[in-house]
Image: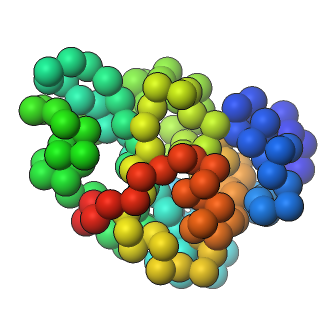
Amino acid sequence: MSMVEIHNSVAKVYEENKDTLEIFECLDEFSDTQNFCDHYGFDIEDSCNAILIKAKKPEEFYAMFCVLGANRLDVNHKAKEAMGAKRVSFASREEAEAVTGQIYGGISPLGLPENIKVYMDKNVTDREKLFIGAGNRVSKFFLSPETLIQLSSATVLDLT
């Protein structure tokens, strides 16, 4: 796989951690979680979705939340509480791409700007191995939950 196909910040993380990250190439049309699992034969419980949330009050800022593909992030209670915000919403596609520098549908919790805090649902730690976006829609990373938490500097909480 050409590193040109991976966002620069994610490529740096990969280069520094090749021993703990595997890359899986996929077709763009199968990048979305359910389609990826159906087409390539993976369990949705082994997927980890990265969701960018925008705090609106008291000030505007972003945080990344990671939950298993079959789970739903509790945005209005648990995400809001984790961020210490009064109002939150899902970042738009345009915001997510601008803030992360990555491609929507393949955004990774790895290689994010330092001002974006990462929160990981505790259920993620129950899996042996996960796949996550690699910054684009044509590749995924496979890694252990421990590696994901370490490389993303995530805080593990009950988020679902």
Q: Depth check: give the residue in front, 6 or 124.
A: 124
Which one is nearer the viewer's eye here, 32 or 50? 50
Q: Is residue 146 left or right of residue 73?
A: right
Q: Residue at x 75, y 30 (%)?
A: 8
Q: Which residue appears farthest toward the right when viewing the image?
A: 2
In the rendered image of this protein, does residue 128 appear above or below residue 105?
below
Snapshot quadrant of residue 141: bottom right
Query: What residue do we see at 44% from left, 44% from top?
Result: 118
Left or right placement of residue 25 versus residue 99 in this view: right
- Nearer to the camera, 79 or 52: 79
Q: Is residue 85 left or right of residue 8?
A: left
The C terminus: image quadrant: bottom left
Q: Residue 158: x, y in percent?
A: 28, 65
The x and y percentages for residue 57 are 14, 23
Q: Residue at x 68, y 57 (%)?
A: 140
**Which color scheme did the rendering employ for the protein?**
rainbow
Q: How far from the left and from the top, in percent, is residue 147?
A: 65, 61
Vertical position of residue 133 compared to residue 84: above or below: below
Residue 91, quarter of the rendered image: top left
- Quarter of the image for residue 108 reads top right
Query: Is residue 39 visible to the viewer in this orientation of the structure?
Result: no
Q: Position of residue 71 (x, y in %)?
A: 33, 69
Q: Is residue 57 visible?
A: yes
User: Does 137 appear above or below 140?
Assistant: above
Question: How many marks can you see?
Answer: 0
Most extreme residue toward the left is 86
Q: Identify the residue shown where x is 35% and y is 30%.
A: 62
